[in-house]
Image: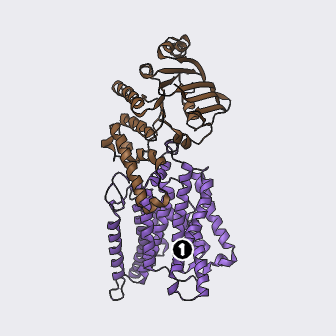
Chain colours: A purple, B brown
Amino acid sequence: MGKRKLPQMTLIAVLLYALIKVLSLDSIGALNGYFMIIINRSLIFVILTVSLNLINGITGQFSLGHMGFAAVGAYVSGTITTLVLKLSPDVASSYPIFIGAIILGGIGAAIMGFVIGFPSLRLKGDYLAIMTLGFGEVIRIILNNINYVGGPRGLLGIPKFSTFTIIYAFTFFTIVLIRNLVQSSHGRAMLAVRENEVAAELVGVDTTRYKVLGFVVGAFFAGIGGGLLAHLLQIATPTQYGFYASALLLVYVYAGGMGSITGSIIAAFGLTFLSQFLQLGFDSLSNMTGINFGSEWTMVIYALLLILIMLYKTEGLMGMKEAKLLVIEEGTK
Amino acid sequence: MSALLSIENMSHYFGGLKAVSNFNFEVPEGVIYGLIGPNGSGKTTTFNLITGIYRPTEGKILFDGREITGYRPYRIVHRGVARTFQNLRIFGNLSVLDNIRIARHFNFKAGLFGSLLRTPGALKEEKKIREESMQLLEVMHLQNRALEDAKNLPYGELRRLEIARALATKPRLLLLDEPAAGMNPKEVSDLMDLIRRIRDEFNVTVFLIEHHMKVVMGICERIKVLDFGETIAEGLPEAVGKNPKVLEAYLGKRGA
């Protein structure tokens, strides 16, 4: 067995955390509140993208309704914490309850993953995509029609529990756990399903089990991500978790590389920042020239850059490779 | 010798096409058994039926005295039946070692949470699988390739890897679907040695489909000949080789 990389990973994660914390101090001011919001959002999108990659990239299934799972996590945890806050308004002492609510949200999403996983056994490729797309929309429409969680207006007044530290910690654990899973015997069984289903079955892999498992674990972490997002934005609306957001996650997975955790991290972070920087760039360009470049130009350039990535890096930025730091032992990717 | 695999009155239809018709045969434990016949005579279909890819329209399949008809393929593998494919089905994007380790997975005793958290128990299981897989690669002379992507291997080694992967499931019966396809004469004679060695060292009964007559006549101890889904001859290689029906099915076709 190769040497364990976890201490190394933890060290780098802690250093990075400290760096961001120091830079965001008021006295230094290198990272203002605006940047911290983008960083927090990017981290949550890392969780969502990595979890989608487990379903699409590792297990070789196709989920086009991944935000549906995130919605379940957001609404379950959001409902719990708003209730708790009503009963005892002391936010500071409620952190354990918040963590519990987030995990319950994940479990709720995992149950949905299980429910979706089963019909998926009979469907492949495009058909599976259409079914999961339908699932995402069903979730959205159901939420639209439940008055208890605000209907189309959304769930309001969710306490702001998702601090940078909390989000950072959840992101770190998500990456470590999914890395552990992918590079274990169970993970290899999932990869075998992706590579060749018939061959997997004929070397003794219960392909049914691993397809459902991919959906369940992927949905669990999506639920966690959704929960964190709701407690960051303090609101959860059905439209946030619609098709557009699911498609965006899919773009991140493909741009990063199908099956590469590293790629998902880079893409989720990089592309979120890219779109923000483009926005900033256009704004200052407008200011300098006096000509108004609308924000729609941001999306044009952004889309163009994505097309370029896919043209020159057909397999995504990382292909199927992982950064050395995320590889547990030699011979596993 | 008792029968390891017995097939009773098995038939299989694809729509109106009779792919396999009323098969009855037994593969005794410990032999190298050959199934031959012209293209389209139902050989691969027979393998697909035994391994559970298709469910027979009629009849029964018994392995080691117990019925396996209609079982999911992975359960049949767990019972002790492994196979290779006519056109290779290697996990090309994974390493050679991972190809083998996946086939050892059915013996992995740690649960999902053990793997997520890398508990000592799970790590011990991982280590065991890795060691067993490396040993197997050494036996198959593939140890130097362990960390390479399987898709980068030359054809002959891919064939060997597929056999190694099938052996990794610790089978009692190994089904080889045209193992000599696309091999040069040197590779063919190496393959024949390998098949004999596998039978002797791994204690595996070998059941193979082959077009290559040198292989069939050279290593098979019993042969069954199919034509259009029906058995036309069965027995020892010498007798089958002289059977007029067999000569007609093969040579008659070629002459026409």
In the rendered view, would you say A186 is above or below B30? below
Residue A84 percent location from the top left of the image: 59, 83
Amino acid at pointer 1 = Ile
Q: Is residue B23 left or right of residue A286?
A: right
Residue A273 figure quarter = bottom left
Q: Is residue B160 visible?
A: yes
In the rendered image, which residue does mark 1 sit on?
Answer: A102
Q: Is residue B149 visible?
A: no
Viewer-nearest residue: A21 or B240: B240
Give the SS element for disc 1.
Answer: helix
Viewer-nearest residue: A317 or A229: A229
Residue A100 percent location from the top left of the image: 54, 75
Viewer-nearest residue: B51 or A307: B51
Residue A77 percent location from the top left of the image: 57, 75
Q: Is residue A198 left or right of residue A143?
A: left
Q: Residue at x 34, y 37 (%)?
A: B139
